[in-house]
Image (tube, grey):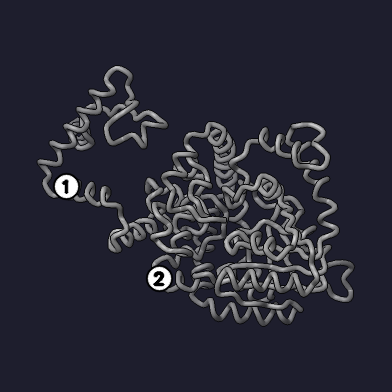
Amino acid sequence: MEQTSHRFKENAERALASSTLRVALDRTTTLLRTRRAAVVAAFPEFAEVRGTAARIKDHTIAHLDHYLEMFERNAIASGAKVHWARTPDEATDIIVRICRQAGARTATRVKSMLGEEIGIGEALAAAGIERVETDLAEHIIQLAGDPPSHIVMPAMHKTHEEVAELFSRKHRRAPDALDVASLVESARRELREKFLSADVGISGANFLIADTGSVVTVTNEGNGELTTTPPRVHIVNAGIEKLVPTVEHATVLLRLLSRSAIGTEFTQYTTFYNGPRRESDRDGPREMHIVLVDNRRTDMLAGFLRPMLRCIRCGACMNHCPVYGAVGGHAYGAVYPGPMGAILTPAMSNLAVAGDLPNACTLNGRCREVCPVDIPLPDLMRRLREEQWSRGLTPRVVRSGLGLWGTLARRPGLYRLATRLAVFSLRLVGWRAGRIGAFPLAGGWTRHRDLPSPQRGTFMDQYRAGRRR
């Protein structure tokens, strides 16, 4: 997809003006937050397991070279072929070459963010290979020509009414009815033949297990197994940070993944792939290829963004982010949206291209609170902002504003006077309505929502009054 993160403000402005998008985001993020809260409350060991999971990831990352070599050795022993790619272009070249060697004309694909990251859709199209997305949400956005807007629910930006209209236009046979069950049945009918006739199946990996060479995928629709089993060739593309040492370590992370992602104890399908079909197997691919992708992950390993390599791609951070909840995923203009995208995008491109993403955050800390591997997301964004400042990438108006604030903050008397004047002015503007619909220099906020009229007195005034009581 074309990266437009440097136009975040423009993208966000457009998203805020869409009432349909707001309905779609409210429906889904509210549902996911509610489900997660219930399933975590019913799992008293969650905090303890979370700490264990973070330590597993930190240990694996600290010894990544050792576990990568172990994984390669054991995957080859199982009959798989392992390929290494430093860049997205190297990864897609390898995948296209494997497809051509197999004489492939069609390839089915299971949703994977790594595939989006390396641009596999564009690469297959350029090679003349038909790509069939088999995940329901990916099927929707492929028909619509949209990029994904969420890493777990890529069609989150669409209401089911919009999907009904899309399927009625695009499916060979229109849905029998417009309720959700009929839409799912319509997609199943449309995809069934594609599953059985594909030459190559492409999947990602939720985990790679070093001591067995296994690839683990976690899905809910059964499309994963139908994508990877009938075709002659199965290609796995995965980032090198997906490694865990053993099956036992993988099970710790599996206990957190589904709870954090969709608010259920476990997914419908958790599959362990161990090489291609053996002589005694009744089905399965004749070849299995695993493409391990770096794409600047080793740069992150050596820098302050290293904790981001713990990420298990659950999407909980974006489900609880007020910025994501207001503008959705497309506003971020990159493969990874939300708080984790605000860090991964500059890490995988650069700070100048990432634009305002590290600033698309209120630093309220909810993303860290719900992260199943305790990634300090607000701290990492704060560090990226410092990098922007030190490299002169912060806009002049922001630098001037912070300079003015710094001048006031070093003079407590002047600071208190200025804040009292500001509170008085805001209360004067919102006097009758109790809210502020317009204010100089605040058009970016008031254009789409009202600013609440402040309470009487500054925070310090109220704090002192509270202490006296």
Q: Amino acid at mark 1?
A: Ala
Per the model, the C-alpha gap separating discs 2 and 1 is 32 Å
Q: Position of residue 96 (x, y in %)?
A: 70, 70
Crowding at label 1, few (<14), some or many (≥20) Cα neighbours within 10 Å? Answer: few
Q: Position of residue 142 (x, y in %)?
A: 68, 49
Nearer the N terminus, badge 2 or badge 1? Answer: 2
- Name the residue beneath numbered marker 1: 409
> Residue 86, which numbered label?
none
Q: Is residue 246 above or below residue 443?
A: below
**What kind of element bears circle 1?**
helix
Q: Say which quarter of the image contains residue 205.
A: bottom right
Q: Position of residue 333 (x, y in %)?
A: 50, 51
Quadrant containing the N terminus in the rendered view: bottom right
| Residue occupying the point 28% across, 29% down | 454
369 vs 98, nearest the viewer: 98
| Residue occupying the point 53% across, 47% down | 330
Q: Say which quarter of the image contains residue 207.
A: bottom right
Q: Amino acid at mark 2?
A: Gly
Say whether residue 432 is left or right of residue 175.
left
Quadrant containing the C terminus in the rendered view: top left
| Residue occupying the point 68% across, 75% down | 213
68 vs 197, nearest the viewer: 197
> Residue 303, which numbered label?
2
